Image: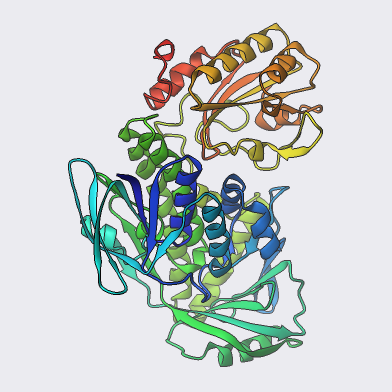
Amino acid sequence: MTDVLVSGAGPSGLVLAIELARRGIDLRIIDRDTSAPTTPRAFVVKPSTFYAAEQLGVLDQIFELGVPVQSMEQSFEGRIAAHAEPSDERWPWHLNLGEDDLVPILIARLERLGVLIERGLELVRYEQSARGVISVLKNRAGEEERIETSWLIGCDGVHSTVRQAAGIGFEGHDSDLHWHVLDAQIEGWPYTANHGMLFLDHLVVAVYRTRSAFRIYSLSLNHCDDSWTSLHDILRDVAPSARLGPPISDVSFRCSARLASDYRVGKVLICGDACHAMSASSAGGMNTGIQDAMNLGWKLASVVSGHADDALLDTYESERRPVGRAMIDVGQKNDDLWSISDPVERSCAIRHFAVNFWAYLENGGNGYEAVMGDYKASRVSVGEQPPIGPGPGTHVPGDIRLHKVNGAAVFLTGALSSPCNTILLLIGDGGLEAEQLVKTAIDLVRASEKALDLVVVAHSTEGAAARRVLDFDENSLLVDPGLNCHNRLGIAMRSALWIRPDGRIGSRNDDVEDTTLLIDQLNAAFPGLLQSPEFS
């Protein structure tokens, strides 16, 4: 019997399938469309997705195809209302990369893992059985196939068949605002490719570059079949040197603000847009769905492989549903502003919006916190928050540079991209306590039956503790001569951290001499990960 059926091969479905396939889970992924999307859809790729792409092994590909935006400006009443630059030293503000370009990258990665999408195959109904889920699939010829799987995951969009059949509510409302996506060339555009512009005088006009053209998002209070004509006049007003070329594509749509009442019913779970629908103004729908899939993927794989009981899956909803709610609220707040029909009232409201956004940027805002979410209260984020630096529930910073034993440069997050849970040790200059800590960690990893990986960050390769790691596996040792990693994480001497497979800190224990506390935390978080009797 197949372990998992994934219904829907959009970004969230593909990411989920990759995460399962990376961990050796037997799966099928289907999609009723006969081909991947080619029309403009989601476009803004936030740093939250960069983290995911690094773990998925597609980071270089998305940056090769996308256009990094290093700065954003909002213009209102003929002046710059806010200027944004990324606070993260590694990542740009965001990446201009359409869903129609991202999906082929994910498909290629999935195929390299040996999984092919079954296209033209639609899930029409299903029922849960004692062993799992019996699904009925129908092909383009109308022929039906019954399959039984242990789990069914609905990544089938806002009109999800899986969600509706499970009786899961999708509460909220549809928006009266009309969004338009125009692809065209612009001659004489006065801004660089790495600069994004938002013009607020005409509701919203956002202008971005792709590798081949410009993509312009605009908003109107009334339906418009031809956004090109209105944008031609607007651009002539806000950027007199610009000349808008003929439309390559012109797509209109309306958004919703809806959130699923549950993310799981028995052996059936939903993910991505099946869980939440939000305004395009949040620029977070696709990014939020990808983070959903990253969260669910390792947990479902842990359950299927027997490393955890299925209570672990309850933490998927408890961690991700608040994020969906927060992102919907961001979009709704924006939509309420754009929906003000009186020009004077709207102008006043936009001024307040611009001032607040400026303050947010000045305080280091980077535009992706809500997408990532805060898992500090989760059952799989264990222990006290440290007085300095990131603690349980937060993501490891993405810009900590280290190098391997052979001298090759590496980011810490890249070294923590294992499909497994990882023990991360920071041992500084070493010493007897550090050597003992490394010894107990190596014993734990060896006895975990491949449920755990090990990464050790040391000042050099010379200390006894570092040499012990080299004897175990030189790929597990990272060198940090300036102790930058210690400083960034707020660690004075040494620390033992459990890093979850999604890059989050599961627990952090400073100045310990062995892994006893860490073992207790792992067993408390999800019994079954450490199956050896000596760890129970």
Q: Residue at x 76, y 87 (%)?
A: 241
Depth check: give the residue in front, 387 or 5. 5
Q: Residue at x 62, y 28 (%)?
A: 388
Residue 92 in the image: x percent, y percent?
69, 56
In the displayed structure image, the side of residue 234 where residue 118 appears, left or right: left
Q: Residue at x 64, y 84 (%)?
A: 184
459 shown above or below 166: above
510 shown above or below 411: above
Residue 511 in the image: x percent, y percent?
62, 14
Is residue 9 visible to the viewer in this orientation of the structure?
A: yes
Q: Quadrant of the C terminus?
A: top left
The quadrant in which residue 71 appears is: bottom right
Colour mapping: rainbow
In the displayed structure image, the side of residue 490 where residue 109 appears, left or right: left
Q: Quadrant of the N terminus?
A: top left
Depth check: give the residue in front, 214 or 332. 214
In the displayed structure image, the side of residue 292 where residue 358 appears, left or right: right
Depth check: give the residue in front, 349 or 426. 426
Is residue 83 visible to the viewer in this orientation of the structure?
A: no
230 shown above or below 500: below
The extreme top residue here reads 432
Residue 118 in the image: x percent, y percent?
40, 62
Depth check: give the residue in front, 65 or 134. 134
275 shown above or below 391: below
Residue 407 in the image: x percent, y percent?
82, 33
How many marks can you see? 0
